[in-house]
Amino acid sequence: MKSYKILISYICFLLTLGCSFDNKTGIWNEHNKKVIETSKKGEERKDILKKIQKYDQEIISNNHINISSVKQNSNWKQINLLSTNNVGNLFYENKKNKILKSKKIGKSYSNIIDKTFEPLIVNDQIYFYDPHGNIYNYSILTKNLKWKFNFYKKKYKFIPIKLNLIINNQNLLVSDNLGYIYNININTGKLLWAKNQGIPFNSEIKVSEDKVFMLNQDNKFYIFNKNNGNKILDFETFPEFLETHNKQSLSIDSENLYFSTTSGRIFSINYNDYKVNWLTNIKKINVLEDTPLFFSSSIVRKNNSIFISTSQVTLSLNSQSGKVNWEFPIGTNIRPININNLLFLTTKNGYIICLNSDNGKVIWSNKLFNDNKKFQKKTIGNFNSLLIISNQIFITTENGYFLFINPQNGKLLSYAKVTNGFFSNPSVSNGKIYIVDKNLRVLSFN
């Protein structure tokens, strides 16, 4: 009986989430009205997908493709490196030697990894966290821990903590799966401020000047003041009550912000005047029988296009109107890489695919898992991440492998098992790869 009352109370609580009692700014109702009106317009709310088949085809191309020039970056301050999430072709020394393996730094839970987190790197210092909520500043040069910070009390001791991090100037901004957002000084590890919104945050964080953008797990959008954590704006989108492990993605330019939700919508908002530019529905239930829940990759923006992969399809949309440029029947939650007019994708069943990003046509596709007994999916593991480094496709896998692949044809160049598994995805800085393994050790390769 007690459990039944708790369940009823929880349902009632969820129902109240669709309502807001905060109208201090006087703009919440206006924005929700705008969102609702936009979603009702037939030309704005689109059912994009028709019944499609899984992609399962290898295509060979003998044409040379042009990869953009290599760019060297010295920092990695946020997930996906840039505010647009368009990573590009990064410089890597390509010696493939392990040059750093720290001692175990954090506390791990068995089988808990963060498939979206990438260690943050600033001035030869690496920032990462563990599932107990500890945040670490580790010196790459001295190979010592500079500081450790934990925001959480003993009552959260047995709750796995999942954090979202971004560095902006001297601020390390953090959101978590308990509904907190807080700010730490990156040099001292001291807490500057903390706020709680009551609902877990489950999105990437983006920052523009003093504005911080994120979404909670119910797809409620927030803008906070970076300096004090005060809320500037919030509004409801479309809640999704099914449990999902998907992280909502955000991408920004000089005045517009694009974000995806777990209900399968993409929004474009002008974050200077707080107006909704457009809203597109990219979800179609049961398009594929084995993808009952919606998930998506990070939104990648370049020029007037945005690219996103979902559980069902990869899409290119016009960033000005939200209209679909093309669609391709590949679903993945791994961030696409857009270089020149090329779009690189990976799939769950082991395909590497290169598309023409202007029209969505296949240039080449190759299935990596083959009849070679030493290179099977059960041995290598699912793909975790995708990068282009020094003119090579670079992939990490859940079983601790590095794969290097020819971007001209998708053929495997080399591979190696570097650890027993990863907690994070890789970051690249100053020509070196940095990654945290499942034993919470920092690894670096030149």
Image: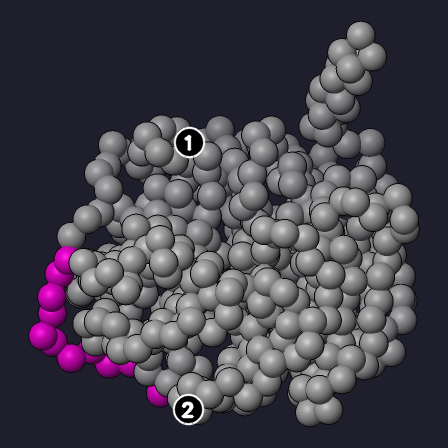
* Furthest residue in direction top, as rendered: 1
Label 2 environment density (alpha carbons within 10 Å; few <14, some 14–19, many ≥20): few
The number of discs equals 2
Q: Residue at x 60, y 70 (%)?
A: 436
Q: Upstream in the sequence, badge 2 or badge 1?
A: 2
Q: Residue at x 26, y 49 (%)?
A: 328
In depth, the one of 227 and 56 nearer the eye is 56
**Quarter of the view holding residue 238:** top right
Q: Secondary structure at mark 1?
A: loop
Q: Is residue 260 left or right of residue 302?
A: right
**Is residue 252 visible in the rendered structure shown here?**
no
Which amino acid type corresponds to the residue marked 1 in the rendered image? Pro
What secondary structure prevails in the magenta region? loop
In depth, the one of 292 and 264 nearer the eye is 292
Q: How is the image coloured?
A: one colour
Q: Is residue 339 left or right of residue 105?
A: left
Label 1 environment density (alpha carbons within 10 Å; few <14, some 14–19, many ≥20): few
Q: Which residues are magenta?
A: 58-72
Q: Label 2 belongs to which residue?
A: 95
Report, in whole angstroms, how far the alpha carbon at label 2 lies from the one at label 1.
43 Å
Q: Secondary structure at mark 2?
A: loop
Q: Residue at x 89, y 71 (%)?
A: 190
Q: Is residue 394 left or right of residue 122?
A: left
Based on the picture, tell me whether residue 15 belongs to the magenta stretch.
Answer: no
Q: Position of residue 444 (x, y in %)?
A: 56, 82
Q: Position of residue 61 (x, y in %)?
A: 11, 69
Q: Depth-wise, is mark 2 or mark 1 nearer the camera? A: 2
Q: Label 1 belongs to which residue?
A: 292
